[in-house]
Amino acid sequence: MHFKTIFKSLKNKDMLKKFLIIVGILFVYRFLAHIPLPLGEVNTFREAVHNLINSTNFGSFINMISGGGLTNFSIILVGISPYITASIVIQLLTKAIPSLEEISEDGEVGRKKINQWTRMLAVPLAIIQSVAYIYILNQNVLASATAITPDLTAMQWTIAIISMVAGSIILMWLGELMTEQGIGNGISTLILASIVSSLPQTLATFWTNLTNTEQGTLSLFGWFNLPVNPTTFWITLGFVIAIIVVIYFLTKLNEAQRVLTINYAKRVHGNSAYGDIRSILPLKLISAGVIPVIFATAFLSLPALIGQVILTNNADSTLGQQLVSIFTAPNANNFAELYPLGITWKWFIYPVALFLLIVMFTYFYSSVNFNTKEIADNLQKQGGFIEGVRPGLQTADYLERIVRRLNLFGALSLGFVAMLPFITDYIFIVLQGVPAGLSISGTGLLLIVTISLENLRAIDSRALMVTYDDYGKEAPKRKLLKRIKKTKAKAAAN
């Protein structure tokens, strides 16, 4: 990354304007996260939301993606998940239906059509999710509220659904506005802002616990005492070191790639010759990115959500209790309730199922997203070949073998990253009898690292374009300064 170039590019008015627009959109996004949904008694529904987040991993996952919109019971409660789901569905249909694939390959016009269909599909998905959320939250309110809460009227349902769908569409529009600035993907940036928005509260909690000296202070080599809690200090220090190591590992994992050398045969056309050059074909270790983790987490959380709905209507349902017990991610909030006898075989079902689903979705998405036969055909048409491999079918088979091996290691690595919080919980259970409660941090860290690197690359590319003319102007000056220095050095030597 050319950080000096990035800072230098801020002197450009157009670049500075783009940054200010993105910062302004992020402020609007955080403002929307605190506008309450016009539905009944807000505080009562917020209590129901808090219970939902603690009881199911799906609730905490949606709350993270929506930037606290679920906790605040705001109009962006649905968030941008309908647009993400619609994008994935359209992308899969594009690979499965030849006519859609032809439209997607039709340049800018085809891309606009695909984007328009994605927006259109996101609206009914937002309506469905809004109805589901309101029903679940209303049932939780009716089941747990201390005061008698009347059923929602048709007008209240309509206003709430319109508000939630409008909030989702506004977020989709804000994300596209950010993408148009050309310095990062807008939807990914909103997800990054959603995750980072919870950091100030987490840091404040850590600071409060750290400065609580009721149990004593930390003695520094017996010279003087620091006004911090010794136990919290060492735990915090251990977490900071672990997070730095994990971020370094995730960065290397995200940037890892296998580079293949492509040779192009020399061609003579009339009096001109072209070709006879070498290029590279980079194959990323994790070509699917974080999509397998998101898919696996959402897919595995649905049975627990269904079990919660069943228990809301019938608290004695055995099926609902089994679904919630087996498919709820074990954490510090629910461990004592779900596992009163300590760790049992049920505790391992969710982590093992999550690991297997991540591996499966990694292979599935990579096979859809990376077509080895199409790449081999394009290389053959352009006169390119891999040394030692015949063009055509053998090149496709060779690429397929390499991608299969990369997917194996990439899938296992993604699964290991997702397992880190559960491994931490297991260690804390053995040592202290209570898990650390970091069941979503692996996914959060992976999203933060991946999106941050993508945005940095986009900003770096834009900064190089903005400052390109400056490099052209400064190049002759640098050459002149070098000549003057060489002349002075020779004169001094003589």
Image (cartoon, rainbow, N blue to C red):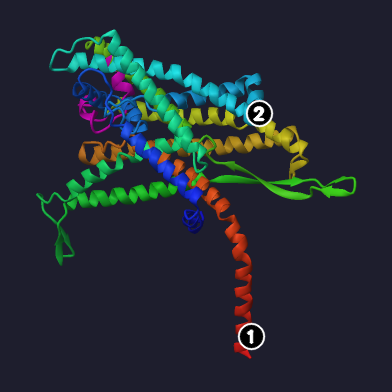
The residue range painted magenta reads 319-343
**Label 1–label 2 contact, CB within 8 A:** no
- Seen at 53% across and 46% down, the residue is 256
Crowding at dot 1, Cα within 10 Å, few <14 / some 14-19 / many 20+, comes out as few
Q: Residue 490 carries which label?
A: 1
Residue 321 is a magenta residue: yes
Rendered view: 184 above or below 61: below
Q: What residue type is labelled 1?
A: Lys
For disc 2, the marked residue is 105
**Which residue is nearer to you in this view: 381 or 391?**
381
* Side (left or right) of 121 relative to 377: left
Q: Residue furthest left?
A: 214
**Which residue is nearer to you in this view: 174 or 262?**
174
Rendered view: 478 above or below 193: below
- Seen at 25% across and 11% down, the residue is 152
Residue at disc 1, secondary structure: helix
Q: Position of residue 98 (x, y in %)?
A: 66, 20
